[in-house]
Image (cartoon, helix red, strand yellow):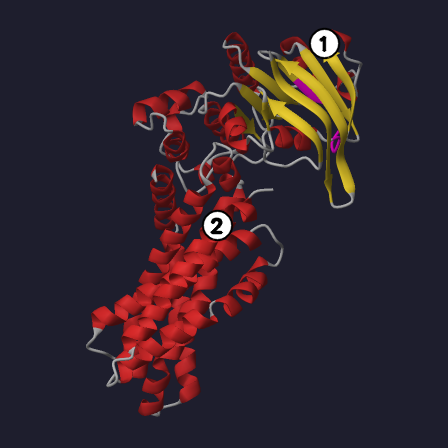
Amino acid sequence: MSHLLVALRKDLLLQWRGRAQMVAIFAFGAAALLLFSFAIGPDSLALRQHAAGFLWLALLLASTLSLAESFEREMEEQALEGLLLLPANARALYYGKAIANWAQLALLGSALVPVMVILYDAGTIRLFALFGVILLGAAGLSAPGTLYAAMTAQIRGRQTLLPLLLFPLVVPVLLAAVKATSLLILGDPMGQVRPWATLLGAFAVVQWSVGGLLFDRVVED
Amino acid sequence: MIAIAAAGVSRRYGRRWALTNVGFEVPEGALVMVTGRNGSGKTTLLRVLATALRPDMGTVRILGNDVGREREQVRRDTALLGHRTHLYEPLTALENLAVAARFLGADAGRPALLARLEEVGLGDRADDFVQTFSAGMRQRLALARTLQQDPRVVLLDEPYGHLDPPGFLLVDGLLQRLRRDGVTVLMATHLVARGRKLCDRGLVLEAGRLVFSGSVAEMPQTDADAPGFAEGA
């Protein structure tokens, strides 16, 4: 547990030091939302109907940048290897990094919500529920994303490989997150948000468990 | 007691063997120079001993513990200074040492870490970011971080790399201190004349094979012994 807290503290500090990069990633996500809105055109109903899908697509695309970035700092001077040789617990290193990435993605998703509201006229009064869905969706993205970012960090062409590996794996997360967000924006007369959120939570539990089990195999020789 | 016992160690990258059937023993407290040309396998050997790489064949025991099966214990006993510094560039010198200290469960307070930095001549740069450091300063900080572990076996890969003449003397001093403390040191270096003065034993690698293992006095002449080879201070 203490190694997990040390790892988390280290990763949050590294993220704070790289906050300029975070602003750039947010700008990327906002630009993606803007471009998607051009594809729909001025039809306000269609914009509202597609808002949730585009929000999650923007977050998914932006996440590949932030996840890859989180391991660049570990690989520059083989700092991660240095921690493993101390020896630091590999599982603690994974969960520290994954929690920090989760927080970053949740923040990024939350920051993109006002952009979505402005561009797609797609607001909701159920803000807490929306942020809950973003938290669960971000958890489902960050756990496998952290694992695959570690796997591809030392490979040439990692910027291409990471999305290739990650996207198929997070399709269920994306579907559930889009559905739940869409229901919150367009109305939920049948009370379907909760089952979709439960599904998101279940995916997250599975992804976080598998990530913790596999991480040391990924980073050790 | 034997600190390092390697037998039949081989390691390959793809189809190329970097180490072939390397075997030697190092008694506890010995200071050993590992030398050989570029690509002779010095770095691979040190990385295998440090558990950063697994050997494809052979066994290595550090203080009686197998590097494959008892990796955690080997890592607790061993510290590696590699070609890469293991530092986080966006963190300050002090923060880098603090991260390692917290993982080690050691004192991560500012006074204790400042003392470590003073030891390597970086006391006045404690709050500067590593990304602003020169290569020599990074090497000094990496040395401080390596010795933070208080290891019983220290593996140094080119510890004099990037250092200025005072830095050479600093490493000499650290090696002498480690010897006094009974720490076993394996140092890969091209500075053979310096190694002959400081070390008790030598290992010479050639194309991944161990061609000499014994006292430095009996060590054969190498390219680095040739007249005109500059060693710095």
Residue A213, labelled with which disc? 2
Q: Nearer the viewer, residue B70 or B52?
A: B70
Q: Secondary structure at mark 2?
A: helix
Q: Chain of mark 1?
A: B
Residue A211 located left or right of residue B101: right
Examine the rendering and report whether any part of residue B191 can be seen: no
Residue at left offset 38%, top offset 58%: A22
Q: Which residue, as the protein is rendered here, is positioned at the far left?
A: A125
The amino acid at mark 2 is Leu
Q: Picture quarter containing residue A3?
A: top left
- The residue positioned 52% from the left and 29% from the top of the image is B75
Image: A100 above or below B143: below
The answer to whether residue A76 is seen in the rendering is: yes
- In the image, taking residue A42 as reference, residue B33 lies left or right, namely right
Neighbour tally class for label 1: few under 14, some 14-19, many 20 plus, Cα within 10 Å: some
In the rendered image, the quadrant that contains the N terminus of chain B is top right
Q: Residue at x 40, y 33 (%)?
A: B103
Q: Which residues are magenta?
A: B33-40
A195 versus A73 height, above or below: below
At label 1, the amino acid type is Ser
Q: Considering depth in this image, is B228 or B109 the residue closer to the camera?
A: B109
Q: Main secondary structure of the magenta part?
A: loop
Q: A61 and B233: which one is in front?
A: A61
State whether residue A148 is above or below residue B118.
below
Horizontal and vertical percent position of residue B213: 75, 16
For the C terminus of chain B, give its image quadrant: top right
